[in-house]
């Protein structure tokens, strides 16, 4: 699978049967100023929760790409009101099938509200199952024992986990999360974007190295094969 990192928690995965774009937050991210929205393609856009740093460019990109948006039920109305009608609503615990495979929504321990104050529903993570492999995107979350359930729902080739601390897990907790998911490859996200989540990247690698897990920290705009 081919992953492209667009900064903060925004990335796309080309599964070979469709391009999935997660948590688009690009134009408000100073670190992603070199990314041109017009260059981004997607068949599906998945939103983990309603916070601005995960949905800021969702409407624009849904309209530009014609992608179907997969998100919590309560975000559907907010998207519909802005002219995005191709939305598949889900909730924690549910699985649904799409052209590329399936998505199971899993628990994320966090909070959620939309940028205009609208109720943002429960935050979620996603286990994505495709013929080319399975992966897990945790969304914004604390380390939670629920992550021990992840291997029941997929053979996780790689996990995309927040490592920035303050609002989510730090690298030490993320390394534990990776072990519980049963994966040996992690892409770290949700760090360095704001002052609160600036990290020492060399230090972040250590807890992963101790567990024999590879931590990938792609540059913004970089594509990696996983
Ligand atoms: Ni958040
Ligand atoms: Mn966030």
Image (spheres, rainbow, N blue to C red):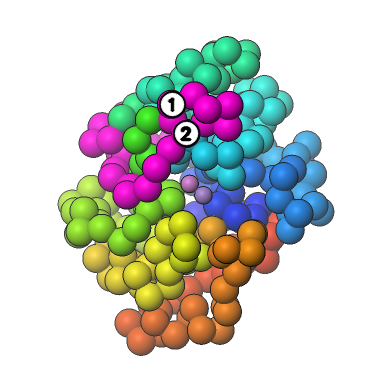
Residue 178 falls in image quadrant: bottom left
Q: Tag 1, which secondary structure?
A: loop
Q: Residue 25, percent across and down?
A: 64, 44
Residue 100 falls in image quadrant: top left
Crowdedness near tag 2: few (<14), some (14–19) or many (≥20) residues, C-alpha within 10 Å: some
In-image side of 67 versus 175 (left or right): right
Tell me if residue 70 can be seen: yes
Give the residue at x 48% y 16%. 77
In primary-sequence order, the first of circles 1 and 2 is 2
In-image side of 55 versus 88 (left or right): right
Give the residue at x 26% y 58%. 144
Crowdedness near tag 1: few (<14), some (14–19) or many (≥20) residues, C-alpha within 10 Å: some
Q: Residue 171, percent across and down?
A: 43, 72
Verify whether residue 112 appears in magenta: yes
Q: Tag 2, which secondary structure?
A: loop
Respond yes or no on whether mark 1 lies under 8 Å from ligand 1. no
What range is drawn magenta here? 92-120
Residue 207 falls in image quadrant: bottom left
Tell me if residue 133 can be seen: no
Q: Overall secondary structure of the magenta stretch? A: loop
- Which labelled disc corresponds to residue 119? 1
Give the residue at x 54% y 14%. 80
Give the residue at x 29% y 43%. 106
Dots 1, 2 in contact, CB < 8 A: yes
Q: Residue 131, percent across and down?
A: 37, 45
* Residue carrying label 2: 113
Residue toward you, 156 or 206: 206
In-image side of 119 versus 91 (left or right): right
Residue toward you, 54 or 4: 54
Query: From the viewer's perspective, is residue 148 above or below residue 104?
Result: below
3D distance between C-alphas at marks 1 and 2: 5 Å
């Amino acid at each position: 699978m081919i992953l492209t990192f667009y900064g903060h928690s925004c990335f796309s995965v080309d599964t070979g049967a469709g391009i999935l774009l997660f948590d688009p937050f690009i134009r408000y991210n100073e670190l992603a100023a070199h990314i041109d929205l017009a260059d981004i393609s997607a068949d599906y856009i998945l939103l983990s929760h309603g916070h601005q740093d995960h949905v800021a460019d969702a409407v624009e990109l849904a309209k530009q790409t014609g992608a179907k948006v997969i998100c919590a039920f309560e975000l559907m109305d907010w998207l519909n009101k802005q002219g995005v009608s191709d939305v598949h609503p889900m909730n924690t615990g549910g699985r649904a099938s799409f052209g590329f495979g399936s998505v199971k929504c899993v628990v994320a321990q966090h909070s959620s509200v939309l940028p205009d104050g609208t109720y943002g529903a429960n935050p979620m993570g996603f286990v994505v199952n495709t013929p080319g492999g399975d992966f897990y995107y945790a969304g914004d979350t604390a380390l939670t024992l629920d992550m021990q359930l992840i291997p029941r729902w997929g053979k996780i080739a790689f996990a995309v986990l927040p490592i920035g601390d303050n609002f989510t897990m730090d690298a030490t907790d993320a390394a534990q999360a990776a072990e519980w998911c049963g994966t040996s490859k992690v892409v770290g996200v949700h760090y360095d974007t704001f002052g609160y989540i600036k990290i020492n990247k060399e230090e972040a690698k250590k807890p992963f190295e101790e567990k024999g897990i590879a931590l990938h920290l792609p540059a913004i705009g970089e594509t990696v094969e996983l």
